[in-house]
């Protein structure tokens, strides 16, 4: 059974002591200290089978519910997210779920995306899920299935909805090995991640203090693409029935383009996430590529491959302000820092950097090429094969 973790325990710093490798707690809830609205739901633990070694690891999982992104993301607080999360799971446990899983006839190896829709999902939305599914499957070749469950409900005025990738942690050693082993033919950067059992991270942008980070947060889909096999749903989403959605971006947009929003939120589920703002002093797989943009006191922005290996990562909420980027040495992309937009995005700017922009707005679409070179480079870096 799912268990709702008591909020006093999450916010009050009560330690959950499941000592893991190297004496570090391995439970993905124990450092949940959201600065922004978020609700954490514990999921059943599972055995994960490592792709490279066949070794089995007992893994803990949580869903982290946050507002659906966009300029209308506001007015869902943690209590509102809890309510919609529990309603979502009640809906998914009821009868009448529709599976959107188009057969991949005659297509070369592709990721398999499956949307599992509660009966509350409007019939008019189903073609939008088919569009999102087929688009995402055409981008990536990983031989895995990504399952996303979706419901609708009447939510507050101006609220797009709530969405939650599920997360676990892996040791840095396992994360690095998975990223290196899973690198496709175009990837060379992963092998330059620092060797050893930890990576240096700055968790404050106003301090030079380094943390030797020995674990990494992965979304379930990213874990499967990179490290090993687990079952379970990769993400859950609930959208507002009262909102003005446009389910067909090919004939002009009135309201919010639903296909764009679903692809963006599935992108978070695939691992386009930053730990800042949600967890205290933790890093995600994408954060292994995150640096300070200004050189500061210690030449923090890497200019060469050697510097990319050696420089500390930066995973800090709004510090230093507006000086965070994802760095692939040959190219770098400005990132949001948590304020005013969730750090799990590119920086908001005109023109947008990619579909993982934080402030998607009414009347906007990326159709038909939803993901840009920026988005695809990020997914490629964290283990998705192209
Ligand atoms: Zn987003």
Image (cartoon, rainbow, N blue to C red):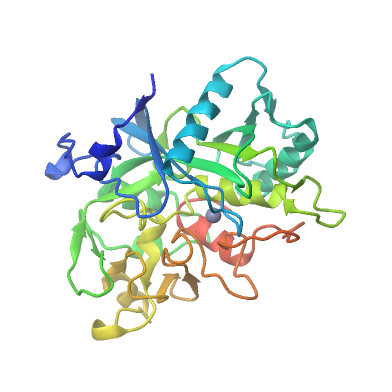
Query: Which residue is drawn at the image coordinates 43% and 39% (left, top)?
Result: 79
Percent x, y of residue 295: 32, 84
Q: Quadrant of the N terminus?
A: top left
Residue 228's spot in the image, x, y percent?
40, 37
Q: Nearer the viewer, residue 298 or 322?
A: 322
Q: Quadrant of residue 27?
A: top left
The residue lying furthest to the left in this view is: 23
* Residue furthest to the front: 157
Residue with the most extreme right position: 251
Horizontal side, residue 355 vs residue 164: left or right: right
User: Residue 215 or 107: which is nearer the viewer?
Assistant: 215
Q: Is residue 223 visible?
A: no
Instruction: State ligand 1's quadrant.
Output: bottom right
Q: Is residue 86 above or below residue 348?
A: above
Inspect this view and state whether residue 355 appears.
Answer: yes
**Which residue is depicted at the point 19% across and 62% down?**
211
Question: Which residue lies at the image location 78% right of the left edge and 30% below the top edge?
Answer: 123
The answer to which of 123 and 67 lies nearer the viewer is 67
Q: Is residue 268 above or below residue 294?
A: above
**Residue 327 located left or right of residue 347:** left
Looking at the picture, how far across and down is residue 134, in whole percent? 72, 42
Asked if residue 10 lies left or right of residue 367, the reply is left
Out of 210 and 122, give the one closest to the viewer.
122
**Residue 150 vs residue 252: left or right?**
left
Q: Spot the residue most to the top.
A: 95
Determine which quarter of the picture holds residue 105.
top right
């Amino acid at each position: 059974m799912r268990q709702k973790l008591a909020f006093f325990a999450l916010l009050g710093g009560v330690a959950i002591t499941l000592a893991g490798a190297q004496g570090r707690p391995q439970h993905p809830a124990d450092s949940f200290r959201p600065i922004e609205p978020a609700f954490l739901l514990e999921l059943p633990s599972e055995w994960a089978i490592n792709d490279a070694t066949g070794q089995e690891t007992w893994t803990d999982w949580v869903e982290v519910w946050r507002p659906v992104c966009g300029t209308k993301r506001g007015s869902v607080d943690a209590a509102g997210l809890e309510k919609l999360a529990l309603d979502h799971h009640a809906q998914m446990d009821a009868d009448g779920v529709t599976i959107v899983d188009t057969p991949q006839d005659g297509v070369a190896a592709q990721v398999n995306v499956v949307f599992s829709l509660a009966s509350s999902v409007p019939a008019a939305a189903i073609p939008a899920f088919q569009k999102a599914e087929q688009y995402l499957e055409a981008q990536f070749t990983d031989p895995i299935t990504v399952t996303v469950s979706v419901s609708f409900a009447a939510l507050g005025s101006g609220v797009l909805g709530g969405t939650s990738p599920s997360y676990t942690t892996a040791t840095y050693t396992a994360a690095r090995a998975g990223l290196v082993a899973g690198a496709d033919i175009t990837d060379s950067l992963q092998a330059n991640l620092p060797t050893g059992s930890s990576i240096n991270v700055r968790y404050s942008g106003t301090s030079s203090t380094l943390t030797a980070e020995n674990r990494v947060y992965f979304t379930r889909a990213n874990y499967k693409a990179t490290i090993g096999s687990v079952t379970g749903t990769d993400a859950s989403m609930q959208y507002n029935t009262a909102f003005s959605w446009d389910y067909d971006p090919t004939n002009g947009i009135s309201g919010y383009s639903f296909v764009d929003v679903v692809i963006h939120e599935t992108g978070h589920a695939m691992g386009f996430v930053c730990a800042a703002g949600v967890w205290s002093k933790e890093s995600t797989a994408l954060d292994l590529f995150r640096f300070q943009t200004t050189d500061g006191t210690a030449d923090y922005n890497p200019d060469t491959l050697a510097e990319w290996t050696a420089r500390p990562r930066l995973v800090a909420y709004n510090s230093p302000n507006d000086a965070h980027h994802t760095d692939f040495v040959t190219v770098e992309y400005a990132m949001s820092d948590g304020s005013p937009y969730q750090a799990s995005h590119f920086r908001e700017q005109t023109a947008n950097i990619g579909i993982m922009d934080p402030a998607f707005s009414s009347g906007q679409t990326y159709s038909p090429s939803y993901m840009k070179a920026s988005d695809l480079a990020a997914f490629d870096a964290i283990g998705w094969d192209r």
